[in-house]
Amino acid sequence: MSGWLKIVGLGPGSDAMITPEVSDALADATDVVGYVPYVNRVAPREGLTRHGSDNREEIRRAEQALQLALEGYRVVVVSSGDPGVFAMASAVFEALEAGDAAWRKLDIEVLPGISAMLAASARAGAPLGHDFCCINLSDNLKPWALIEKRLRLAVDADFAMAFYNPRSKARPVGFERTLDVLREACEPERIIIFARAVSTPEESINVTTLEDATPEMADMRTLVIVGSRQTRQIEREGKPLVYTPRSAV
């Protein structure tokens, strides 16, 4: 079988954060499949067909990619960040499990990318330097009650937390509710970081406290990091450095 399928991460935005392994896969591909903005990050060239689709068509997109590979094409499915973090790797495997048995014979590989939470953490210092968890705040695929339960348990366990998809035009109140839950469970001075469009020209890093945080500080291009009780801020000239010690108290 000559076709193959690689599920790759394009990193948070800058081409400098695309791994050489992913660059090699893109150079060898005949087809690129993904959400339109991510497909558009792959430069057109002769011999490459780009298949862009809507953000909510993940399973159909995965099925298309699997079928193209079955037909002998060299297919790359693109995600931003890392493909295994709230992205296309899970969608492809969901389609694979439920779909054509012939798809299971394909050469399928997941190539990691630099996730938004790791890029954001590096820009701020090392707020994820000890135990942490990652929560998608979108309630499109799970109920708000489950999100709230996980928030409260994460605070109780004293994890630092990284939040994806905090606030969109379709979900303007979700992040406000998240802040309400955190304020019920955390001290007002808990450090919170709003990292927007990391590694792009629009990048901004805002280090503040839970007391001063507002819903409007986040949008869909923002990765939010909430520190644990142990997280500290080092003041210096310019932007502060935030880190969580590796030793727990």
Image: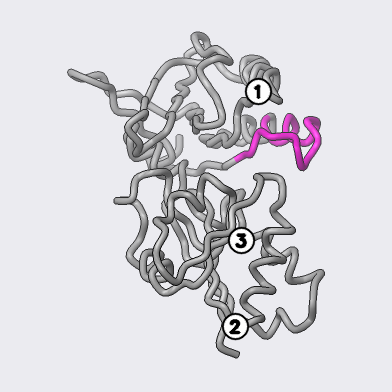
Image-based side of 202 in relation to 139, left or right: left
Q: Answer few, some or many: residues within 10 Å of disc 3's Cα (few below 14, many 20 plus, some between 14 and 19).
A: many
Percent of width and height locating residue 212: 49, 9
- Ranked by sequence position, the earlier of labels 2 and 3 is 2
Residue, disc 3: 89
| Residue picked out by circle 2 | 72
In space, the residues marked 1 and 3 are separated at their CA atoms by 26 Å
Q: Could you tell me residue 198's position as x and y percent?
A: 38, 36
Mark before the other along the chain sequence, 1 or 3? 3
Q: Which residue sits at x=45%, y=21%?
A: 191
In the rendered image, residue 184, in percent from the top left (x then y), is placed at: 67, 15
Q: Is residue 167 above or below residue 142?
A: above
Q: Residue at x 53, y 60 (%)?
A: 50
Whether tag 1 and tag 3 are in contact, CB under 8 A, the answer is no
Name the residue type under label 2: Gly
Can you say whether 63 is above or below 123 in the image? Answer: below
Q: Count the labels in the image.
A: 3
Q: Please tell me the numbered disc located at residue 169.
A: 1
Counting from the top left corner in percent of width and height, residue 48 is at 47, 67
Quadrant in which residue 109 is drawn: bottom right
- What's the amino acid at mark 1? Lys
User: Which residue of the protein is positioned furthest toward the bottom in this rendering?
Assistant: 1
Q: Compare residues 118 and 186 and report the one nearer the observer.
A: 118
Provide the secondary structure element on which disc 2 rests: loop
